Amino acid sequence: MYEPTHLRSFLAVAQALSFTRAAQRLAVRQSTVSQHVRRLEDATGRPLLLRDTHTVELTVDGEAMVSFARDILDAHDRARRHFSTAVVRGKLRLGVSEDLISTYLPDVLQTFRRRNPLVDVELTVALSGTLHQLLDSRGLDLLFAKRLTGQGRGTSIWRDRLVWLGAAEQPAQWRPGDPVPLVVYPPPSISRAQALAALSSAGRPWRIACTSGSLGGLVAAARAGLGLLPHSARLIPAGLAPVGSTDLPPLGEVDFILRSHPDTDAAVVGALSEAIATAGQPAAKSDQPG
């Protein structure tokens, strides 16, 4: 009843909330994606997306179809691989940024393992800047990490804002004019660099209240009220919340991307890309404190 190709196009639009970006990700024409979505809506008999010249939003039925489409495609892909002679196998040296570990990566790896049981994964967790360096030196096959918006390396999976996070119940306090206390990764951290650049551009003094290479360490420090943590708005750890102070400058945006070494097996890269597409992008978190 539902064509897998139509479902893939729909999921790409639902993830990107843009027909143009969905077409780029699928390497097809935008008109093709639009046609696939229209045919899927014809098959369901209900509108799945609300779109105008500027925005794309999921309807209630569209939100339900996201879950159904993932299940249908998962079953379809498992059946295809079961009866295919081209089984993906081998070893994948995967680098993942700290931000993704506890909140998002488990779903991706579970889907990947279920679909590709013969691929062994060697996982490296590090700062995004470090992962890019490892890939360039052939220490990784593939990375799933952040990059500054506008940089050309890698394929964008989703775009997100960086926000200031503090303890949900008792955030750090400072008086006007005092240096802003920061809880940050060491260099070469993208979020650290963005935070320091934003504060410097705004003429705001700052101090490093806590440094840790572990997200768990940073979360503990921020929850204890030591300072503010610049972090992805879609991957907010438990116990933290956006700080709504107008005294703080905006931090800008980052892209979460996939980037592979040219020598990496294309089938393995494609398999992980499928797992990420099935997981979808994390739900946006509220901008309100508390």
Image (cartoon, rainbow, N blue to C red):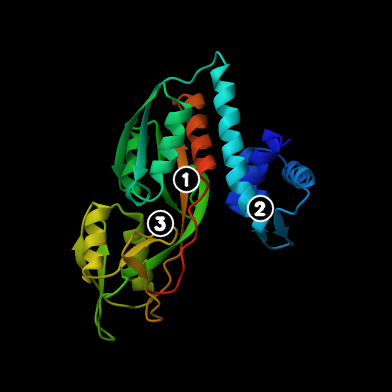
Q: What residue is disc 1 on?
A: 257
C-alpha span from label 2 to label 3:
23 Å
Q: Amino acid at mark 2?
A: Gly
Q: Is residue 239 above or below residue 272?
A: below
Of callouts 2 and 3, the N-terminal one:
2
Q: What residue is disc 3 on?
A: 235
Which residue is located at x 34 percent, y 78 percent? Answer: 203
Q: Amino acid at mark 3?
A: Leu
Which residue is located at x 45 percent, y 65 percent? Answer: 252
C-alpha span from label 3 to label 1:
15 Å
Of residues 94 and 152, the one nearer the viewer is 94
Is label 1 in a helix, a strand or a loop? strand
Is label 2 in a helix, a strand or a loop? helix
Question: Which mark, residue 62?
Answer: 2
Side (left or right) of 267 relative to 104: right
Can I make out residue 279 in this image? yes
